[in-house]
Amino acid sequence: MKSYRLIPMAVLAIFLLGLDQLTKYLVVQNMEEGESIPVLGKYLAITSHRNSGAAWGMLQGQMIFFYIVTVIVLAILVYVYFKEAKNNLLLQIAIVMLIAGSIGNFIDRILFQEVVDFVDVLLIFYDFPIFNIADSALTVGVILMLVEFFFMGKGEKDAGN
């Protein structure tokens, strides 16, 4: 029997997407672009920032490209979820996080032609690019997927040989 855990996964996706959109809304409504509020001294701040590109500001202003890529990626993720993630909770969580993160930034691109970022972190001497909840969901989703593919799924393949 296939086990997809659709309701808990839908709740996770809605929670992540709602948290992403709520935090972005609060930043847009309550802060001027460029304004920064320290949270943990110089190491963590809420900084109102906009990004019309991808991670690290790559591909600035290429909205049509992002629209097309996001729709393709979402279709692939949904396909993989139903074809490959049955009975695999870690892979289901990873895919749901990727879907929620993709949709969160996609909403921004459609509504504003840019993404609202606000989490500003200084890692010792490296000023990490400002990001948001959707970016965090994408990052954690990728990490979970890599853990599944390289560590967890390895035993299943070995057992079958």
Image (cartoon, rainbow, N blue to C red):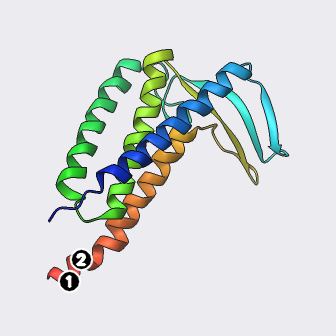
Snapshot quadrant of residue 150: bottom left
Q: Which residue is mark 1?
A: 159
The reply to whether discs 2 and 1 touch (Cβ–Cβ < 8 Å) is: yes
Q: Is 142 situated left or right of 52 in this image?
A: left
Is residue 22 at least partly visible in the picture? yes
Q: Residue at x 24, y 65 (%)?
A: 87
Position of residue 22 relative to residue 124, above or below, is above
Q: Are there few (<14), some (14-19), or many (20+) residues within 10 Å of tag 1?
A: few
Mark sitting on residue 28 = none
Q: Residue at x 36, y 45 (%)?
A: 10
The amino acid on which the numbered mark 1 sits, given as a three-letter code, is Ala
Q: Which residue is mark 2?
A: 156
Q: Nearer the viewer, residue 27 or 154?
A: 27
Q: Nearer the viewer, residue 159 or 28?
A: 28
Q: Are there few (<14), some (14-19), or many (20+) residues within 10 Å of tag 2?
A: few
Position of residue 130 relative to residue 136, above or below, is above
Q: Is 25 situated left or right of 134 in this image?
A: right
Q: Residue at x 41, y 36 (%)?
A: 102
